[in-house]
Image: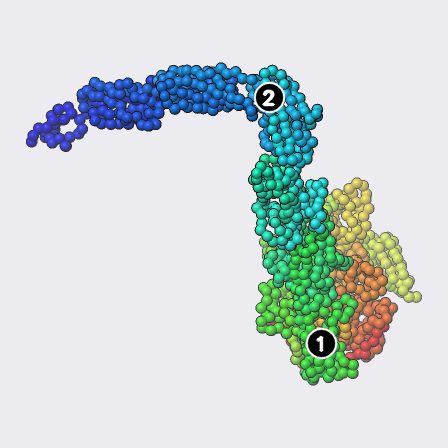
Amino acid sequence: MTHRSCPECEAALVCREHGAVQRPLVAPCPNKRGGLWVSVHDAKGQEVPGVVVEVAGRTAVTDATGLAAFDPLADGSYTAKLGELPPSMAERYHPPAEPRIAGIAVSKGKIAFAELVLRRLPTLKVELSKALAAKVTLQQHGGGEPRSKSTKDGTADFGTVPVGTHTVQVELEARAEGQQVEQVEQTNVTTDYDDDVIVPLEVRSRANPVIEPERDAVAVDADRLRVVLRADGPFQGSGRLTITAGSQHVQVLRNGQVEGLTQDALTIPDLDQAGVTVELEARSASAYEGVTLQWELLGGEVGPPTSTTITAVEATLVIHDPQGNPLDRQAAQGQGRVLVHGRAAGRRARVTVSCEPAEYPGTLQLLDPHDGNHLQLYQDATGGEMLILPHNLRAPPAPTEGQRTPRVWPVELYVEGIEPSEAAGRDQLDLEIQDLGRADWVRLTVVEATLEVCGPRPEEGEPTPLVEADKLEPGRRLAAQNWSFTNPRALVRVHKRPLDAPCALRLVASQPELRLLPNETRPKDGETAHVLPMTIAAGQITDAAQGLVLWAELDGQTPDEAKVTLQLEVEDLLAEPVDEVGFAVDLATVEIEVARHDEESLSADVRVELRNQPDGTVLLQGLVPAAAGKVELRVPPASYAVNLVAGPGSDEEPLRLLRDPLEVSPTETEKAESEASAKAAAETEAREAAVRVSTEKPTRVRYTYAKPYEHIQLISYQIRTGAYLGTDDVERSDYPDDATWEAARKTASEDDIEARCQIMQQIVAHAHQQAAIDSRPTTLKLFMAPEFYFRGRRGAYPIEMLSKIPEQLRQETDKPKYADWMFVFGSAIGRVLHPEREARAGTQVQVDESVAIFSFECKKGSRLAAVNDGWEAQLSSTGATFFALSSWSKLGKKTQNYGTATVCGVYTKELSPTKIQVTLVCRGVPEFPRTDFKLSIKDPLGVKAERVPSPKVERCYVQLRTRCAQAPAPGWWVEQNEAFRGIVEHVEPVEPGVFWLSIDRASDALPRSGIDLELAAEPRAEIFNVAFVQQGGKATSMKPGGGREHRELLVYKETISWIDFEGVDYGKEEFFTVLRHRAEIDGESTVLLPTAGSTDLLGGLANEPGQRRRVPPNAASTNTSSKNEEWATEQSASGLGGGSVFTMHGITFGLEVCLDHASRRLAKYYGGIAKPGEPKVQVHLIPSCGMSIENPCCVPDGLVFNVDRSHSEARNEGGAKGAGIAAKWHAEAPPPAGVELGDYFGDPGLVHIYPELPTPTPAVV
């Protein structure tokens, strides 16, 4: 291998392990070659970039630092040469005298450095001794073009100039028209490279007046014209401004104050070079350039006066009212003009623009301060092309032969509002003169008035406005208003923006049938419609969002398919409406069909009358042809009493009229989820008194003529009721909390009611199957059950559950086979609890006395009759299980004496010549007796005690003292350790916090001293004992005039008996006292309140027949002489008020529940309270639980029917000794399927079917 050496350092290239190697395989040599950097700058060291430098045939351009680098270079001597300067550099620099540097040594590892210094051309600046306007000329000696500069401040900068000698020459500019140019002698100056030469020159001149108006015109009511009055040089003295022409058109102001002129001149003292500024205001229009201003300086070396001319311009903007009359300026800029935003053709207002002098060449401009967003301009009153705002009125033509051609003024335009103003007077149209300012303006209010009509009210939320495209066509379909004013009205809003716009609006209807009202629904006290046309005064609309709210309706007499328009006008501004909405009348279709029950054809046409419900006014009539049997009518949607009038002497005239259920087609069965079914809805409608006609679909009603009932067949279901039996209660201990327990009790009550309904339904079906039933359609079958049929173990159901009873029973009784039946389902017991209780503890108890009062009968002169004070009363029990364990009885022993009491009072009453009643007051009794007990009395001196025959407990009470936070009230309940229970009868304070109580016992135990008492106001419950009456089948019996007879109704029992409820007062006279009236409801002692309106003890708001009672305002009443009063009556008008007299199937019934009959409820009413003309009772019904027929009240041949828990009885007369009617069939009721009878009743009961009897003769009082 050949040895190699490094070309840089000449060292041998040898590998330690392998010897010599090839050169390309070794690393670079560590020795560096040398280089040359060339710096190019001027004499002040300012680097010059972008210059070409050449070294050894290589070129480089200087960088931003003025360096050109040549690296690397081999060792040696080099020459650096400056290249040609670029044009931009050549304007400022010349090359050095010697543009090259030779002999620059370069060696390894070192950088050589060389400098090339450029020669910068000199600069020249001329500064005058005064800040004067002048022309400065620079001329180089030896030739060249002269250079000139103009200056305003006395300074002329020529920048770079050639090297050499120059002549500087200054010419001052003329300072006023006609002045001569002043020459300044020239001066010479020499310049060299790198010089910056400033040439100062001294100038001298006289002060000349200078007048400088900022423009050549001033306008009336526009911006003032500022005029500067000064000298063109240094000056100390005064000056005078003279208006030599047109002084009447302007006035001079200084510092904002008007200056008075003397002979049209204003002298200004103490004037210096800065001068003064005055303002000119135009007072009126002058001729073109008709105002001359002259300014002269007074004192010292000054020039001649100078002058200028201006024009006083007057431009006016006039707006016209809707009648075309111009508004004066005060009105136009005060309240201004109202523009109507909308589509009306007359919405634009005429404006005229005038300018004096007519020759004035400036530009007039109309503009909207809101950048054209609120106003638009047009050349025509209607239509035409819109002019963009700001709009320039073209200046007059250019001068011709020295004359200006005047323009023809005024210019007529039309302004329109395109956006409502934010507030009244917030918009305006300005007239400006270019450069002169606003010369005139008019105040504008752009008002937008709109109508909004809304669609029907949704189930939730507010009515939604119709879209703009639909509010006129097709508009709002609106049902014609009905007699009861219940058809929905359309919400109409009148909007106005801005609210304070000074203009009135007016509503106009195209047809008189349209009414506008203030309310969505008719108030109870009526209302008055707004009179149309209706004016809406300025300021009447105060709510921007709601506007003016009105409700529109169409009169019931509106023609079918009529179209009515409501228009909105801006009063006194436009002759045409600015907005309008449309209404299309909606009428409903009702089809009435009439047939006969015996399927015979009608013998004559039948007149149809649609009436309103309150007073029966005939609203519409039609005729059902005998051949067709139907007629179709178009009417406003409403509920109508439909009255059919058979032709006089026709076969139909004596028949009774039934309305069949509404027929439901398959397509009508699809209903919203909130409805059970269309069928159910139709059946509910069929039971109402009136027919509801709607626009949703045609309403079809079918009537049937049927023969009157000639006979009545009575059917009884006698079953033992009254006991607290049932499945409506559950144990509290079975449930984790009260809420769960109450939910379970509610379910249990529902189940209890459902089971009793199932039993009743099966009994009704069983009775219907019997052969003893008269199936003729002219015989009314009347089924009745006893009182308390619907009562469970808790004593009463929650009142809200009673409504489930008739609903469930209807599942059976609505069947067509019961079309000639009528049902009285005994009674149901409901309650409304008033559970609020006030309670407190009684401590430090001290029992003072325990008293029992007994009575017995004995012979006069007997040993018992000799009883007196101080005798012993020996008491013993009989061992009866009704007693609790006490000191009077021991378990296992039937009779034993364990205590005595002391007789402290004896009272006698003669019953007969040989018999007396003895009453004993015994003090210190050991226990209170309740039922079976024995009483003996003993003379303290005697040996043997005398046994008292049949003793009776009259009363037991205790007297004690206790400490309480507050006194309990009479009637409060008292308990002690769940043993003693009683009722506070009397309270007396003993000392602060201590009270003496007299307590009537409610248990056989006595209170004990030293044991705390619990005292509380007992809960109260309003009791509802309701008899349910139903007509069978689905048809509704109709009355003359279009009303309906009762299809179902309620009769409330007025009185509460001492045997109606279990509890502490069961069977006791004390029940009928104010402080008692207690029974067990829901497992605790409760004060019973009769149904509101009852005249019974503790009843509230009593409605006593024959007396006036308060009714709500505008409630329908017949017998009243006062707006809010009517006579209380037993006649059941609604079927819900509980009255005991009602009409069904054309027959008048009277119904008394148990004790009401014994209280002679009907007998009292017909004994002098019923008014002449009222129907008498034909059938007297008495469902009871412990009552028999005592006070019949009916027509002479009337029927009296009593169904009791223990018997069934029927009579055929109105007297007290009417003939009894024997049942023609009776049998024990079959056991019910699917129900455990024993859970609800003690026996299966009996079904009695009586023979059919003639319908009693109707009569009136």
Does dot 2 land on a helix, a strand or a loop? loop
On screen, residue 1178 above or below 498: below
Outermost residue, front direction? 401
Taking the spot 71% from the left edge, 76% from the top edge, the residue there is 658
Task: Tell me if mark 2 has few (under 14), some (14-19) or many (20+) residues whose alpha carbon lies within 10 angstroms of its own.
Answer: some
On screen, residue 930 above or below 787: above
Q: Which residue is mark 2?
A: 304
Q: Is residue 345 visible?
A: yes
Q: Measuring from the top left, give residue 361's x and y in whole percent.
A: 59, 38
Identify the mark nearer the N-term, 2 or 1: 2
Q: Measuring from the top left, give residue 834's x and y in whole percent.
A: 72, 55
Residue type at mark 2 is Pro
Does dot 1 land on a helix, a strand or a loop? strand
Q: Image check: 759 left or right of 63?
A: right
Foreground residue, 1082 or 1196? 1196
The reply to whether the C-beta atoms of the residues labelled 2 and 1 are less than 8 Å apart is no
Tell me the number on the disc at residue 847.
none
Outermost residue, right direction? 913
Q: Image check: 30 left or right of 820?
A: left
Quadrant in the rendering for residue 1032 = bottom right
Q: Is residue 259 visible?
A: no
Foreground residue, 809 or 89? 89
Q: Which residue is mark 1?
A: 658
Quarter placement of the N terminus: top left
